[in-house]
Image (cartoon, rainbow, N blue to C red):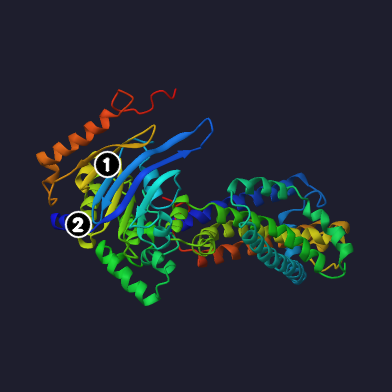
């Protein structure tokens, strides 16, 4: 992990976001400033988490990067390209909270979907999906239908699908949010292993503090109304092992993120973020 | 095995009790056949006239089948065309409600005048129109009620609308299509049968029911009704069998998680 981290620090920018703002329902009574002057640079190979309460714009920011939604001002560069060009050139893979697998396709065919759309021929697709099934440790399940798999297994298929065309960037929107705690921790380790094997740059949206700390090189803290970045906390845990989650270092980072979140919590209660809406 | 039996027994038991009570009521109360013929009378008329029943059922069944075929093709075509313009699922429901109020069967006399009344054409046409609507509405729903996350995924993969239609919308619509077919198939038999009440060739179930009733042969009229029910059931069960073949087994109906 450290090795990859050091190597990639020098290889340039995977993502450059500068002065990005986005307003929903502009000019209406229910106008919401989803993103306000967001600046963020991500190095190639870096793992960053976006964390914050509901409505802080973390998912919106992820969608802006993926060109799934537009933005009003500022610039975004994904591998030096506009988000639209990056999407059209398939420079990123994406995984959502829902695995969103196609029920009418086998597990293998689900993983092959991005390859089909990218025009790969059949034998190349099959070789690649077998490779990816192996990576997510589901080699025996290629011919199964998605609904025959557990939630964690479905999410692993979704991750394999997001890696299919071997894009340099991986966008993940709370991919483990619907999983139970045990599965979730196992999936986190899987993701770190996949990251080591592939060297992908990963932008990971979550609202779990321990998850963000455990996975990331850097935790980006966001706060709502208007959605903006309020803190960036570097995490230096080295190689994650079984005892990482119990180490002092881990607790210090968790505390640092928690305090950064609390600092900008406008509700004062430390939990709710809905003050002033009643 | 056990669970299969538990599905079969209750309807058989209910049907037997119902027919028994019916028979008993007719015999004890000495109800005249023009009011309510006994099941035994209907059964004997049915077996005595089996050849005639079969011929009539084949005639009406052919009309129904042709109407179902043309209506399905037309409904599918219309849905594929319409989904390019109607992109919001909310619009489909009022459209469906509006279409449901059109008294299509009442068009038969008009169609009889427009086309050759001695041919099957006006009947097939009415059946086609009746079938078209449930197919159209259900397939539209299936094309539009797509998981938004899957749509986002398709966008992230830079899929053209045509590709999204082929890869996501059409497969998504297949269960909806079968729902439409299951509504349309028995409806096709009813439409083909009722269309015969407005004149034309006298070979079908509808014509036979009408003429038997006009001749006070009530047992026979009811026997033809029974033949019509069986024809409708055959259509329905055929669709179910095709659905089983086409859609993978034990797929959860709402596996959208």
Does the rendering let one see residue A227?
yes
- Foreground of the two, B211 or B160: B160
- Foreground of the two, A150 or A131: A131
Residue A217 coordinates in the image, percent (x, y): 20, 48
Tell me: residue A245, above or below residue B178.
Answer: above
Mark 2 and mark 1 in contact (Cβ < 8 Å)?
no
Q: Chain of mark 2?
A: A
Tell me: residue A251, above or below residue B179.
Answer: above
Which residue is at a point 81% across and 48% down the rendered structure image?
B35
Tell me how far mark 1 sits from mark 2, CA to CA: 21 Å
Residue A223 coordinates in the image, percent (x, y): 33, 34
Q: Chain of mark 1?
A: A
B115 on left or right of A237: right
- Circle 1: is it few (<14), some (14-19), or many (20+) Cα within 10 Å? many
Which residue is at a point 35% across and 28% down the rendered structure image?
A273
Name the secondary structure under disc 1: strand
Q: Toward which corner of the image does residue B140 lie, by quadrant?
A: bottom right
B163 on left or right of A198: right
Residue B257 coordinates in the image, percent (x, y): 41, 50
B103 on left or right of A259: right
Quadrant assignment for the N terminus of chain A = bottom left
Q: Which mark is residue A220?
A: 1
Q: Which mark is residue B184?
A: none
Tell me: residue A109, above or below residue B187.
Answer: below
Closer mark to the observer between disc 1 and disc 2 = 2
Q: Which mark is residue A10?
A: 2
Quadrant assignment for the C terminus of chain A = top left
Which residue is at a point 61% across and 56% down the rendered structure image?
B83
Residue B138 coordinates in the image, percent (x, y): 61, 55
């Amino acid at each position: 992990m450290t090795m990859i981290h050091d190597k990639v620090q020098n290889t340039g920018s995977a993502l450059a976001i500068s002065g990005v703002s986005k307003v929903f329902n502009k000019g209406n009574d229910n106008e919401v400033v989803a993103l306000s002057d967001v600046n963020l640079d991500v190095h190639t190979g870096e793992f960053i988490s976006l964390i914050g309460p509901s409505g802080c714009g973390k998912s919106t920011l992820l969608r802006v990067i993926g060109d799934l939604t537009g933005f009003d001002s500022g610039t975004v560069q994904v591998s030096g390209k506009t988000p639209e060009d990056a999407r059209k050139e398939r420079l990123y893979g994406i995984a959502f909270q829902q695995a969103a697998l196609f029920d009418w396709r086998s597990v293998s065919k689900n993983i092959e979907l991005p390859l089909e759309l990218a025009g790969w021929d059949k034998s190349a697709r099959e070789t690649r999906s077998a490779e990816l099934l192996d990576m997510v440790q589901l080699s025996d399940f290629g011919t199964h239908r998605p609904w025959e798999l557990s939630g964690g297994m479905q999410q692993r298929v979704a991750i394999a699908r997001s890696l299919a065309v071997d894009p340099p960037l991986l966008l993940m929107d709370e991919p483990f949010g619907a999983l139970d705690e045990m599965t979730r921790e196992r999936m986190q380790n899987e993701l770190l292993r996949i990251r080591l094997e592939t060297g992908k740059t990963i932008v990971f949206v979550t609202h779990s503090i321990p998850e963000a700390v455990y996975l990331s090189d850097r935790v980006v803290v966001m706060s709502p109304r208007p959605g903006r970045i309020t803190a960036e906390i570097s995490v230096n845990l080295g190689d994650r092992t079984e005892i990482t989650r119990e180490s002092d270092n881990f607790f210090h980072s968790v505390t640092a993120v928690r305090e950064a979140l609390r600092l900008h919590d406008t509700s004062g209660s430390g939990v709710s973020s809905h003050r002033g809406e009643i | 095995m056990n669970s299969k039996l538990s599905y079969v027994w209750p309807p058989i038991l209910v049907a037997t009790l119902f027919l028994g009570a019916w028979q008993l009521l007719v015999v004890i109360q000495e109800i005249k056949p023009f009011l309510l013929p006994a099941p035994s009378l209907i059964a004997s008329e049915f077996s005595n006239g089996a050849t005639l029943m079969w011929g009539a059922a084949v005639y009406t069944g052919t009309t129904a089948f042709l109407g179902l075929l043309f209506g399905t093709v037309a409904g599918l075509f219309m849905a594929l065309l319409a989904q390019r313009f109607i992109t919001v699922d909310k619009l489909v429901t009022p459209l469906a409600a509006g279409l449901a109020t059109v008294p299509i069967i009442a068009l038969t006399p008009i169609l009889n005048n427009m086309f050759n009344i001695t041919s099957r054409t006006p009947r097939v046409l009415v059946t086609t129109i009746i079938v078209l609507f449930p197919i159209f509405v259900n397939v539209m729903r299936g094309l539009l009620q797509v998981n938004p996350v899957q749509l986002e995924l398709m966008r992230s993969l830079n899929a053209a609308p045509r590709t999204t239609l082929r890869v996501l919308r059409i497969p998504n619509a297949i269960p909806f299509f079968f729902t439409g077919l299951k509504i349309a198939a028995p409806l096709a038999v009813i439409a083909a049968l009722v269309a015969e009440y407005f004149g034309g060739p006298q070979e079908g179930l509808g014509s036979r029911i009408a003429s038997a009733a006009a001749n006070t042969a009530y047992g026979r009229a009811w026997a033809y009704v029974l033949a019509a029910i069986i024809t409708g059931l055959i259509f329905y069960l055929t669709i179910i069998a095709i659905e089983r073949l086409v859609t993978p087994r034990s797929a959860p109906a709402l596996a959208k998680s």
